[in-house]
Image (cartoon, grey):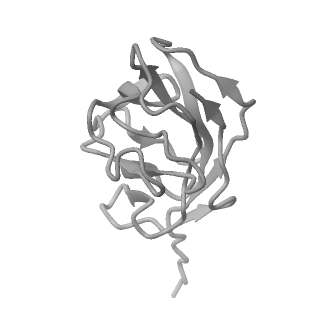
Amino acid sequence: GSIITVKAASLSWTTTALTAKTVVPGAEDVVIYKALLDVGESSLVELTSVRFDANTSFASFGDDNIALLELYLDGKLLASKSNNITGDEAAGAYTTFNSLNTTNRVIPAGGTVNLELIADFASTFSPTGAFALQIEGTATSVVAKDMDNNAVTESITNVNTDSRALTL
């Protein structure tokens, strides 16, 4: 008989370093996090949840400063949210996107895509300061499944790397 080897689905996640930016009140469509996602050849991958953690050195990532967060995969909206930052304006604040658009969250086998988190900022900042977002690399940071609904083990190549430092 023949031996068939089935390769598991794979997802490689690399945070993209972006130029630091000073943000003014009311700024819109500011990319605050970006990553390159690369899917292996064996199966498509569906993102089901993504958690963005604020660098614990900063405490300005909060609902008072951000009016809207939108998560995009290759320019297609996955989800948007307001007033949903946990640990609001404290060291270790984070936000989790789940209930992602079921069509737009699919990455084809062998595909490479860009993921972007885009913010619209509040008309005033309280508190002012700085923040930067990263993927911490825990089991809940990125959750994905393959075409058979099996969990995909993600490889995050630069865990705890800030994508963009933002000064408010």
**Residue 150 visible in the picture:** yes
| Residue 85 x, y percent position in the rendering | 33, 43
Residue that appears at 34% across and 30% down: 64
Of residues 55 and 49, the one nearer the viewer is 55
* Quarter of the figure that contains the C terminus: top right
For residue 147, what is the image quadrant?
Answer: bottom left
Residue that appears at 50% across and 69% down: 8
**Residue 114 visible in the picture:** no
68 horizontally vs 130: left or right? left
| Residue 93 x, y percent position in the rendering | 42, 52
Name above or below for residue 63 compared with residue 29: below
Which residue occupies the extreme bottom position in the image? 1
**Count of numbered circles on the image:** 0
Residue that appears at 56% across and 48% down: 58
| Residue 95 x, y percent position in the rendering | 37, 47
Name above or below for residue 125 compared with residue 149: above
Of residues 14 and 1, the one nearer the viewer is 14
For residue 127, what is the image quadrant?
Answer: top left
Name above or below for residue 30 compared with residue 107: above
Name above or below for residue 33 compared with residue 121: below
64 horizontally vs 99: left or right? right
For residue 102, what is the image quadrant?
Answer: top left
Of residues 114 and 17, the one nearer the viewer is 17
Of residues 113 and 52, the one nearer the viewer is 52
